[in-house]
Structure formats: C-alpha cells, structure tokens
Image (spheres, grey):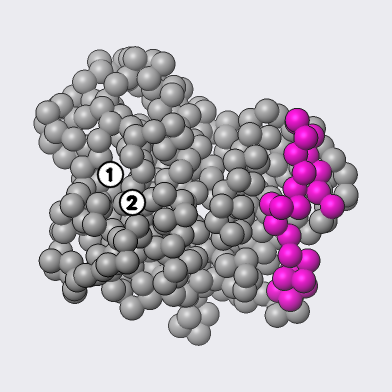
Amino acid sequence: MPSRSCLRLLSACLCLLLLGACGEGPLVRQESYVFGTRVEVLTFGTPEPEAQAAISTVLREFDRLHRTLHAWQPSPLTELNTALARGEQLQVSAEMAGLLTVSQDFAQRSDGLFDPAIGGLIELWGFHSDTYVPRLPAPADLQTWLAAHPGMQDVHIEGLTVSSANRAVRIDLGGIAKGYALDRAATLLREAGIRNALINIGGNIMALGAKGKQHWSVGIQDPRGSGALASLALYDGEAIGTSGDYQRFFEVDGQRYSHLLDPRTARPATHTQAVTVLIPSRENAGLLSDVVSKPLFLAAGDWPAMARRLELRDVLRVDDTGHIQLTPDLRQRLRWTKDIPAATIIDPFSSASAPAS
C-alpha cells in the first residue's frame, strides 16, 4: 500500500499534469513509475505512432538510469559505494564520472547544502526505502555521522577512477538524477523529431515547444493543501523543479520529518515547506532545476544569498508558517489559482523587498 507521502506526491504530479494537458489538440501520453515517483511524457502535434515510439524510447532511458543510479538496490552506484566503504578505488562509466564531477561542483558552490555524499545519513533516517517507517535514528548514530563529516570534497575523481579517503562517504544521486533524466529525455525527443512535449518526473518538469497556439501550463503545488497555489506558462526549453517537505516524509508524535536533510545538523530541515525554481532555456536546464532547489530549501531565510550565488532569478519559497516569498521575475509569470495571504517579493540581486500585490 502506498505511503501517505507517496499519495501526496502522486496528487501533486497529477495537479501539474492536468494543467499541462488542458486544451484542444492531438495529445499523446505515456506514463510510468520510476525514480520512486510517477513520470509522464506528453507530445503535441506528432502522429501517434511516431509519438508513442519516441516516448517509449524515453521511458526505456528512464528505466536504464533508474537501474544505474539506484542508491540502495544493486546498481553501479551501490558498487561504487561498497568500494568506497572499503577504502578502494573503482573505475566508473563516463556518465557516472560526469555526474559526480557536476555534483562536486554544486556541492562547493552551495557550501555543501547540496551534497550527494550524504547517502549514509539518508539511510539513517530511513529514506533508502520505498516506504518510510516512522522511526527516528539513534542520536549517537547521528553524532557519529556528523563527526565523520562525509562530503563530496572527500571524493577524488581522476579520469574514470573514483576514490575517497573518508570511508563514511556514501553517494546518493537522488538530488540530481531526475533533472539529468529530464535533459536526456529532451535530447531523445528532439532526435526523434518531436518538437512539442511536456516531460514530468515527479514534479520536475521540462517543456519543449508549445501545445499548439498555447504554451504548456503547469502548477505549483500547495504544500499543505490540495491543488496548485499558482500556475505559469512554460516556454520552450524551460524547466521547473520543486523541493518540498510533503513529497517524502513520515510523522512521529505529530512532527513531520522529511527527506530534505541538512548536512550541518544531520536532521531534516523544518523551516521551509517548499521551494520552486524556474530555469530558463539553457544547457542542462533540467539538471539545474533539480539540483538548485535543495540548497535554497536548506538555506532558510538566507535563500536570497544562495539564489544570488547560484544566479537564480525565478524562485518561490513557502516558509514553515505558510508565508510565501518570491522573486519579482517569477511574480510576473505567475497566475494565482487560489486566495493566498500577503506574499513578500524579494529580489536576491537587490536589497529591496516589498509585499506582493
């Protein structure tokens, strides 16, 4: 039986896709379940046989990446983690080495708030599972992990050879895999001649082209309610990603514990409900939409400084009280779908902020 968090995630994905699928036109759709979430690919304006073939290619690629990057079931990634735990080096694929190198770069740029080397901490909290048992890790185990302080700075990559002097390093690429898969999907669809499509991997979404005379439209999930807070049009090549405490979590004594773990405290962050980031059309837009939402989520009230460091101009944050903060660029793109309390506009590249109208 799906966990409560899984059901919330499926609801969120459905909300986003219904907005994207509205309107007249020859839509072709396939969906699957991979990366621990529901994925869906829609195309517009391509004859069904060609569209179905292209989408099937994308879904097969998602399955391949799922098997390659799985953090706890046998995979090339678990082979690497086993070697690192033994103090051994391992030869990896060019794809894996590339993802590790990109991860290392973003770990440095985000002061370690995005850091895939914390897989051991993720396991301690019980999130290396398809279902989450409401059980807290032992404080002593958390202190041991903090003392070891594993991070991507401990990972040495030389060509295709990976090693680490810190045996506590355990890599989990769940914070980058969906975004990387978005970019791979976009490449495969374009190579197949598909020009208009919407790709959704558990709320990480990329748009190609348009839906006839309309742009694709997606929604930003209300983290504590049903439906969307707002909708916006996605233009060709744009990607949007959300990190939310409603996606993967369990509760103990009425306290929510989400999968968004702060490496500085070894505990789930509680100061933020959700962060959504819009990435303009550019190389690796999907990967960026997945990666950068995590450090913004963990940065709490310091998120504008992190957005400035990561050069992000389209951000929406919902804090632990439900108050909304957003950048002026994203505010211009949004259409609110429900009444909301006063929001605050914050420009990371300016000292000024003001209530949103």
Which residues lie in the magenta part?
A: 142-165
Cα distance between the residues tagged 2 and 1: 24 Å
The residue lying toward the viewer, choosing from 73 and 247, is 247
**What residue do we see at 24% from left, 57% from top?**
328
Residue type, label 1: Leu
SS of the residue under disc 2: loop
* Marks 2 & 1, CB-CB < 8 Å contact: no
Dot 2 or dot 1: first in sequence order is 1
Residue at the disc numbered 2 = 313
**Outermost residue toward the front in this view:** 351
**What residue do we see at 75% from left, 79% from top?**
140
State whether residue 222 appears in this view.
no
Of the numbered discs in the image, which one, if any, rests on residue 17?
1
Instruction: State left or right for residue 74 relative to residue 210.
Output: right
Percent coordinates x, y for residue 13 in the rendering: 34, 50
**Outermost residue toward the bottom in this view:** 253
SS of the residue under disc 1: helix
The residue lying toward the viewer, choosing from 151 and 118, is 151
Tell me if residue 357 comes above or below residue 128 in the rendering.
Answer: below
Percent coordinates x, y for residue 252 in the rendering: 52, 80
The residue lying toward the viewer, choosing from 109 and 33, is 109
**What residue do we see at 21% from left, 70% from top?**
354
**What residue do we see at 78% from left, 66% from top?**
148
Is 206 in the magenta?
Answer: no
Residue type, label 2: Arg
